Image: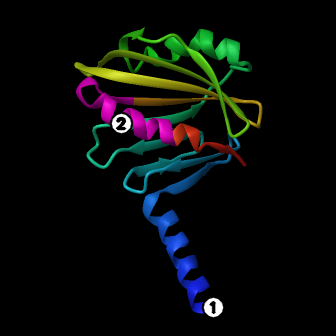
Amino acid sequence: MKRFMLGMMFIVLGFVLVFGETYEHKEGGLSIWFPDTWKIKAEENVLEADAPDEDAYVQLLMLEDVETMETAIDALVEELAPIVKNFKLTTEGQEEKFNGLNFYLVEGEGMVEGVKMGVSVVLIATPKEQIGMMTLLCPEVVYKKYEKDFEKIIKNIKAI
């Protein structure tokens, strides 16, 4: 029986280690899961992740001088303007709740360095009363491939 329990423990630990890693964004009070094949770079106020083939990029940034979800929604296009040229929404925003946190999700498209990009943006009301903006950028031709990964990442964000 002990051998069986020990074996099960290794299987569970292996599953956790093989299928993803969790990172803490202490400033925002968030725990974020990423697939284990993604390359993560964490700095003071920014968390960045690149897909293994580097075709997709995810960034979590704590917005400065934005205190409410409403003001963050109003500032969303302005926040993207320096990175994504000619950004336009392709879906209306929708509010969601995952793991007790409030999210606001939108999708759009625009140009980054001459490449047409699919863009997903999620605003997150953090437990530290900040607003986080998580953005997925990837070429439009592979956008559907990474949209599912991004959805899994979002649904696994938790408060710490």
Left or right: residue 123 compared with residue 130 = left
- Residue 146, position in %: x, y? 36, 36
As drawn, the label of residue 154 is: none
**Residue 78 versus residue 109: which sits nearer the camera?**
109
Of discs 1 and 2, which sits in the foreground? 1
**Residue 89 versus residue 98: which sits nearer the camera?**
98
Residue, disc 2: 146
Left or right: residue 81 compared with residue 111 = right
View extreme (bottom): residue = 2
State which quadrant residue 36 falls in.
bottom left
Q: Return the disc, 1 or 2, that comes first in the chain's sequence.
A: 1
Residue, disc 1: 2
Disc 2 residue type? Tyr
Identify the residue at horizontal 49%, vertical 41% (top origin): 152
- Residue 12, position in %: x, y? 54, 70
Question: In this picture, is 61 found above or below 1?
Answer: above
Badge 1: how crowded within 10 Å, few (<14), some, or many (20+)? few
Badge 2: how crowded within 10 Å, few (<14), some, or many (20+)? some
- Residue 110, position in %: x, y? 34, 15
Q: Which residues are magenta?
A: 137-152
State which quadrant residue 50 falls in.
top left
Left or right: residue 2 compared with residue 115 = right
Image quadrant containing the N terminus: bottom right
Disc 1 residue type? Lys
Q: Could you say whether the residue bearing mark 1 is in a helix, strand or loop?
A: helix
Question: In this picture, is 17 found above or below 144?
Answer: below
Report how far apart the C-alphas of labels 1 and 2 lie in the structure.
41 Å
Left or right: residue 129 compared with residue 134 = right
Identify the residue at horizontal 37%, vertical 55% (top origin): 37
Residue 151 inside the magenta-drawn segment = yes
- Residue 145, position in %: x, y? 31, 36
